[in-house]
Amino acid sequence: MNNKLGEFIRAHRERVKPKDIGLPVGERRRTPGLRREELAQLCEVSPTWLTWLEQGRPVSASSKMLCKLADVMHLTVAERAYLFRLADKLDPNLSLNAGGLSEGLNSIVKAIKVPAYILNRQWDVVEWNLAAEDLFTGWLDRRGLRVQPNLLQFMFCEQKARKLIVDWPDRAKRLVAEFRADCGKYTDQEPLVSLIDALAQSSSEFQQMWSSQNVVDREGGTRRFFHPVKNELTFDQMNFYLAKRHDLKLVMLLPT
């Protein structure tokens, strides 16, 4: 049986120094690092459950539990991402972790002359440039907000989107289908669950389109806008995933 997740957890459990998490170190310890019982207590689970997880038995670890394991074992960003990939779960702190890359991403996006922005898995815009700010009036031209602007919330909850996006009904339908393809099996995990529920409550159109179960690839293509100053604009959209953060993608709009 392939037990990469259990092997990874056990290896990192044994690397944790008890003194680093406030445990006494005076007694002789047969096990390097933390005992299973100690890690289980710190994560508020039973030792039996943790034993089964390390042995590769058919037990499931929730995203919340994986967060506790990652925090207690002091995993690095790369180790934490690997833990969640092995468990086939979405890290609910991804949007927070993105902030740690903010300066580098900002420099990359600002160097691009055409409208460009970076989306996380729930389609929050984590960085964007002045060209995108100028294009997306009523959305990206409002810096200083406490929450990150979200593409779907703009599309379905802002009247300005219906004026800016040419052929809004068709584009909105395709956008929802692209979002379903993009987030895939993570739609039943946070923070996507809360986002989808909020959109469904705010917009009957989103709820209807989401319920249709349509899926299409988000590969780019022609995007048309009717700008309040520059009138009709047409772009070719290109999407690129970041090598070290597969939950983030760069979107560029190239003038045609």
Image (spheres, helix red, strand yellow):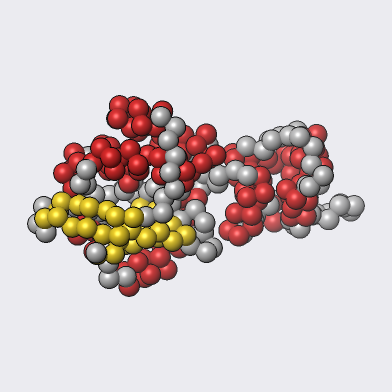
Any part of residue 154 in sight: yes
Q: Position of residue 159 (x, y in %)?
A: 18, 39
Q: Position of residue 244 (x, y in %)?
A: 54, 63
- Where's the C terminus, which quadrant? bottom left
Q: Is residue 116 left or right of residue 215?
A: left
Residue shown at 29%/43% (left/top)?
171
Decide which of 90, 230 is in the foreground and name it.
230
Residue shown at 79%/37% (left/top)?
57
- Where's the N terminus, which quadrant? top right
Decide which of 137, 51 is in the foreground and name it.
137
Question: Exactly how many numbered labels are in the figure?
Answer: 0
Residue 109, quarter of picture:
bottom left
Residue 128, quarter of picture:
bottom left
Q: Is residue 111 left or right of residue 40?
A: left
Decide which of 166, 61 is in the foreground and name it.
166
| 234 in relation to 155, above or below | below
Decide which of 29, 115 is in the foreground and name it.
115
Q: Is residue 31 left or right of residue 162?
A: right
Q: Is residue 76 left or right of residue 49?
A: left
| 211 in relation to 23, above or below | above
Q: Position of residue 127 (x, y in %)?
A: 35, 59
Any part of residue 130 in sight: no
